[in-house]
Image (spheres, grey):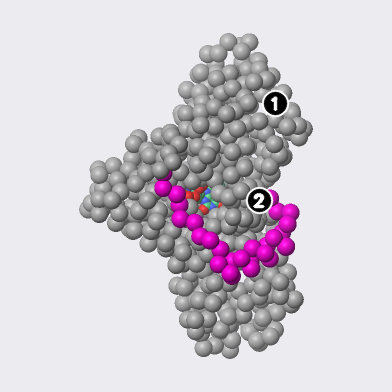
Amino acid sequence: MTRLILVLGDQLTETLSALRAADPAQDLVVMAEVAEEGTYVPHHPQKIALILSAMRKFARRLEALGFDVAYSRLDDADTGPSIGAELLRRAGENGAREILVTQPGDWRLIASLEALPLPVRFLPDDRFICPADAFARWAEGRKQLRMEWFYRDMRRKTGLLMEGDQPAGGRWNFDTENRKPAAPDLLRPRPLRFEPDGEVRAVLDLVEARFPRHFGRLRPFQWPTDRKEALQALEHFLRESLPRFGDEQDAMLADDPFLSHALLSSSLNLGLLGPMEVCQRAEAEWRAGRAPLNAVEGFIRQILGWREYVRGIWALSGPDYMASNGLAHRAPLPALYWGAPTRLACLAAAVGQTRDLAYAHHIQRLMVTGNFALLAGVDPAEVHEWYLSVYIDALEWVEAPNTIGMSQFADDGLMGSKPYVSSGAYIDRMSDYCRGCAYSVKTRTGPDACPFNLLYWHFLARHRERFERNPRMVQMYRTWDRMEPGHRDTVLADAERFLARLHAGEPV
Ligand code: FAD
C-alpha cells in the first residue's frame, strides 16, 4: 500500500527520518509549494524564494536517488491552498491511507496535520544533536534552564573541544577575549554569495509576481540553495572569517552588515548542512592551527549551545509559548519596523539591512531591534510575528525562543536570568551608528537625548517590582536611586512623551 512521505521546505536532508523510513519502491514523496505557507505571516520575499528554490532542487535530488516525488508548484493550476489540502489530493489520487512526516518545527503546522482525516505518523527530527526527549530529561526538576550548563553537558557528550574530561584550553568560555568593537576594514573577507542560476531566477520571477506587497527587497538574491553551495559557503567561512569570528561577534558597523559572521543559519535550518558536521569542521580548523580557540569556541557555542538549547526550549514549551507575555506589554509594533523613516540611526540601519538582505546578525536583532521593542513595551506576539517574517533563517522553533524568551523576556525568565535591555551607551560602544545619529547618545534628557537612554530608565522604573531584587539588576536600581529626584522625573516625563509619539504613529 502506498504511503505519503511528506517532506517540508525545511526538511531538505537526504538522511531525514521520514525518508529513511520510506520504501522508494512503494511510497510517494509529497512536496508542495502552497500559498498558506507563504502568507501565514508576510515572509520576506528572499526567504520565500530561498525555500522554493531549495525545495525544487531537493526534489530533483530525491528523484535521482530513486524516489517517486509528487511535487506541486505554487503556479500549478491544481495546487491546493495548504499542505493539508495537497496531502488529501495526493492521497485521493494514489489511494494512500497513511502519511509519514518528520516532526515539523512549527506548532501551527503540527496542529493542522493532526486535524487531517488520515492517520499521520510523526517521526523524531534527529537532525538535532540533542534529541527533544534528552533535552526534556535535562530540564526536569531544574528551576531555571541556563544555556551555559546545557552547553557544558553537550560539550562533554559530544567530545567537541574537549581534552579528556576537561574543556580545551582549560576554560568553557572565552568571552572575555571576544566581543570587541570593530573598525571598518576594506580588507575584511566577505561571505561567499551565489549568483542565481536559471532555476532560482524562475522562482524569483514567481515570488515577485505572487508576493508583491511583502516587506523586503527580493534582489539581489545570493543565498545557497542546495547542499553543494552550502558546503562551499561553509568552507569559505571557515577559511576566511572564522579566525575573526570571536573578536567581531558582537560588533556592529553601519557599512558592514556581515562582519565575520557565517551566514549559515538558513542552510542549517533548511537541512542543507548538519549542525554536527559544521561544529566538527570548525573544531578541525582549531586543531590544525588555522583558527584561534576563542573564535572556534565562540562559534561552536552558538550551534552546539544556543541552537540546540532554543530547539529544546521550543519543543518543551509547546504551542502556548507563542502567547507568553510575562511583562504584560501591549503596545503595537511601531511602523519603523516595516520601514517607516526614523531618525534613530541604529534602528534605521538594522531595519534597512533587514529589508535589503533578509539578514541582520545576532547583536543587531538582540540589542537594537529587540532591545527597542522591549523598552518600548511592544506586545511580544507582534515582535515575534515580525522576526518570523523578515529573516532568511526564521522558523518558529528557533525564532520564537530567541524573540519571546531571550529578547522580550516574555517567558517569565525561563531562558534568561535578566532582560536584555541597555541604554544607548552599549550601542555606542559596540557600533559606529551613534556618530551618524540625529539624537545624541551622550545626552540624557530633552528632545535630542538618545531614546534608548530615556526608555531604559523608564523600563526599569515601570518594572521595579519585578526586577529590583534580581541580583543581576540591583546595581542598576542603585544607580537610578542615586540620581536627583528632579532628574529622574524629567527622564520619565521625556520617556513618556517619546512613547506617546511613537505609539501614536508619529515619526521618531
Ligand atoms: P553566526 O553569528 O555566524 O552564528 C553561527 C551560527 O550559530 C548561526 O548560523 C546559527 O545557526 C547559530 N546561532 C547563533 N546564535 C543563535 C541563537 N541565538 N539561536 C539559534 N542559533 C544560533 N536564528 C535563526 O536561525 N532563526 C531565527 O529565526 C532567529 N531569530 C532570532 C531572533 C532574535 C530576536 C534573536 C536575538 C536571534 C535570533 N536568531 C535566529 C539567532 C541569530 O541571530 C541567528 O542565528 C544568526 O544571526 C544567523 O546568522 P549567521 O548564520 O551569520 O550566524
Of residues 147 and 9, which is closer to you in this image? 9
Residue 488 percent across, percent down from the top left: 61, 15
Residue 228 placement: quadrant: bottom left
Q: Residues within 10 Å of mark 2 (few under 14, many from 20)?
A: many
Q: Residue at x 30, y 54 (%)?
A: 285
The residue under label 2 is 216
> Is 263 colored magenta in this rendering?
no
Q: Amino acid at mark 2?
A: Gly
Q: Is residue 25 above or below residue 318?
A: below
Residue 116 as seen in the image, left or right of residue 141? right
Name which of mark 1 and mark 2 comes first in the sequence: 2
Q: Residues within 10 Å of mark 1 (few under 14, many from 20)?
A: some
Residue 212 placement: quadrant: bottom right
Residue 52 percent across, percent down from the top left: 61, 66
Q: Secondary structure at mark 2?
A: loop
Residue 340 in view of the camera: yes
- How many marks are shown on the rendered structure? 2
Of residues 428 and 379, which is closer to you in this image? 428
- In the image, which disc is placed on residue 498? 1
Residue 29 as seen in the image, left or right of residue 337? left
Q: Residue at x 56, y 36 (%)?
A: 368
Residue 168 as seen in the image, left or right of residue 52? left
Label 1 residue near ligand 1, CB within 8 Å:
no
Residue 306 in view of the camera: no
Q: Is residue 134 above or below residue 496?
A: below
Residue 220 as seen in the image, left or right of residue 190? right
Q: Where does the magenta region start and end?
A: 188-215
Q: Amino acid at mark 1?
A: Phe
Residue 332 placement: quadrant: top right
Q: CA distance from mark 1 to mark 2?
A: 27 Å
Q: Quadrant of the N terminus?
A: bottom right
